[in-house]
Amino acid sequence: MSGRPADDEDNIVGVAVQALDELQDYVDEATHDPWPGTRTQPRPHGRIRGSMLHLWYGEPDHIVLACEPVPLADILRPG
């Protein structure tokens, strides 16, 4: 582990994945297309690896759209 409590990591990933889900709903409602998929909406996912938050749509073995990794230092506040 990275020294962060597992609950903190779960919360960070959970909030980020929820944000991807909300964005997906917004785009879908605005365009009536299953963004970012072509036939169905791929599920949003996230994972912390080292000091980076990785976010994507699709399954880990079939990523449809990946976001640029986010450094956790940009998310976490000291203390």
Image (spheres, grey):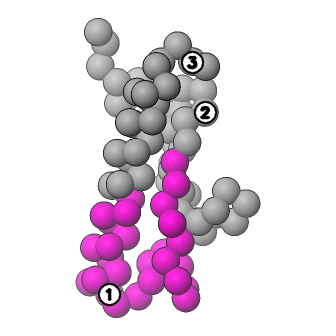
Q: Which mark is residue 2?
A: 3
Residue 27 part of the magenta-drawn span? yes
Left/right placement of residue 20 relative to residue 43 reads left
The kind of residue tagged 2 is: Arg
Foreground: 4 or 67? Answer: 4
Mark 3: which secondary structure?
loop
Picture quarter with the C terminus: top left
Which residue sits furthest top?
A: 79
Residue at point 32% right, 87% down?
31
**CA neighbours of label 2 inside 10 A, class few (<14), some (14 to 19), many (20+):** few
Q: Which residues are magenta?
A: 20-46
Q: In this view of the protein, can residue 70 be seen by the observer?
A: no
Residue at point 57% right, 18% down?
2
Q: Which mark is residue 31?
A: 1
**CA neighbours of label 3 inside 10 A, class few (<14), some (14 to 19), many (20+):** few
Residue at point 47% right, 18% down?
4
Mark 2: which secondary structure?
strand
Q: Which residue is mark 2?
A: 49
> Mark 3 and mark 2: span between their CA atoms?
9 Å
> Mark 2 and mark 1: span between their CA atoms?
33 Å
